[in-house]
């Protein structure tokens, strides 16, 4: 069985948001069309407490997009974004969410960030998604959403590690692109065994 995995289509990642992905809202009509053609739809939602350790504002003298070392490895510092209960954390109003059967909230532990739909950034703390997919006999995921070079990429890589078949819908993802990070993300995903598809291929 296959499922659509919609990653982090939230206000703060769309134009005007705290951590805007350029053109992030332009993929929403494509995602809405796709969701109508899947029997299973899963969403992820960045859900940070105020003062999260990944926020540059919690590190004295640090600026957004600088990197620091955490106990679990390197961490990019971000502008405050997707704070629990805020308008920025809400799904974009144009995104149709009524067909979603599961929402995975991630990044809610204050001391660790979480890009992936499967694991937090320590690579060991599970979100529970693998168990859910196994229980439902879902073995194939089609990834869409934001951002290609962070949460989409890590979700795809971890999904492959968990032995799911992963497809990335190229016209339904957008990236931040820090120093070529989108191109690097595509290379990593394809090298790991993901496949690139277009929405037209799936809808037709």
Image (cartoon, rainbow, N blue to C red):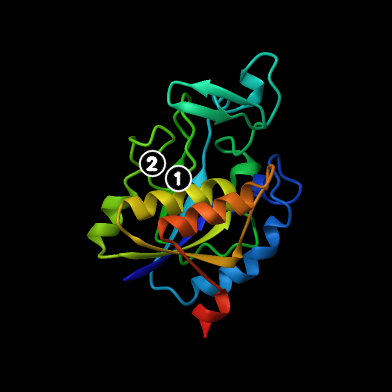
Compare residues 200 and 189 and report the one nearer the observer. 189
Q: Could you tell me which residue is drawn at 46 percent across and 34 percent down?
A: 108
Q: Residue 40 location, x and y as percent?
A: 38, 67
Q: What whole-number distance in Å separates the C-alpha atoms at marks 2 and 1?
A: 5 Å
Q: In the displayed orientation, state which residue is furthest to the bottom.
A: 204
Q: In this view, does 160 lie to the left or right of 77?
A: left
Q: In the displayed orientation, state which residue is furthest to the right.
A: 16
Q: Is residue 87 left or right of residue 186?
A: right
Q: How crowded is mark 2: few (under 14 residues within 10 Å), some or many (20 or more)?
A: many
Instruction: Name the secondary structure under disc 1.
Output: loop
Q: Residues within 10 Å of mark 1 (few under 14, many from 20)?
A: many
Q: Residue 37 location, x and y as percent?
A: 47, 77
Instruction: Name the secondary structure under disc 2.
Output: loop
Across the whole image, how many numbered discs are drawn on residues? 2
Residue 136 shows up from this direction: yes
Residue 6, relative to residue 181: is it above or below? below
Residue 63, relative to residue 90: is it above or below? above
On residue 116, which mark appears?
A: 1
Q: In the displayed orientation, state which residue is furthest to the top.
A: 60
Q: Residue 162 location, x and y as percent?
A: 31, 52
Q: Could you tell me which residue is drawn at 50 percent across and 70 percent down?
A: 35
Report which quarter residue 165 is drawn in: bottom left
For the N terminus, the image quarter is: bottom left
Compare residues 164 and 133 and report the one nearer the observer. 164
Compare residues 188 and 91 and report the one nearer the observer. 188
Q: Could you tell me which residue is drawn at 57 percent across and 38 percent down?
A: 85
On residue 119, which mark appears?
A: 2
Residue 147 shows up from this direction: no
Cβ atoms under marks 2 and 1 closer than 8 Å: yes
Q: Residue 103 location, x and y as percent?
A: 43, 52
On residue 137, which mark appears?
A: none
Residue 117, relative to residue 72: is it above or below? below
């Amino acid at each position: 069985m296959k499922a659509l995995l919609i990653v982090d289509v939230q206000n703060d990642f769309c134009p005007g948001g705290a951590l805007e992905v350029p053109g992030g809202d332009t993929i929403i009509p494509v995602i809405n069309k796709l969701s109508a053609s899947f029997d299973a739809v899963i969403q992820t939602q960045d859900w940070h407490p105020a003062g999260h350790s990944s926020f540059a504002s919690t590190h004295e003298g640090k600026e957004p997009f600088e990197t620091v070392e955490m106990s679990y490895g390197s961490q990019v510092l971000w502008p405050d974004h997707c704070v629990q209960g805020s308008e920025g954390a809400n799904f974009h109003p144009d995104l149709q969410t009524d067909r979603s059967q599961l929402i995975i909230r991630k990044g809610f532990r204050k001391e660790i960030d979480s890009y992936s739909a499967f694991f937090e950034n320590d690579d060991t703390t599970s979100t529970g998604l693998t168990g859910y997919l196994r229980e439902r006999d879902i073995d194939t995921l089609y990834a869409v959403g934001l951002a290609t070079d962070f949460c989409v990429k890590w979700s795809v890589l971890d999904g492959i590690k968990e032995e799911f078949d992963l497809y990335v819908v190229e016209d339904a993802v957008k990236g931040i692109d820090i120093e070529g990070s989108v191109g690097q993300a595509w290379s990593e995903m394809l090298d790991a065994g993901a496949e690139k598809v277009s929405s037209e291929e799936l809808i037709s």
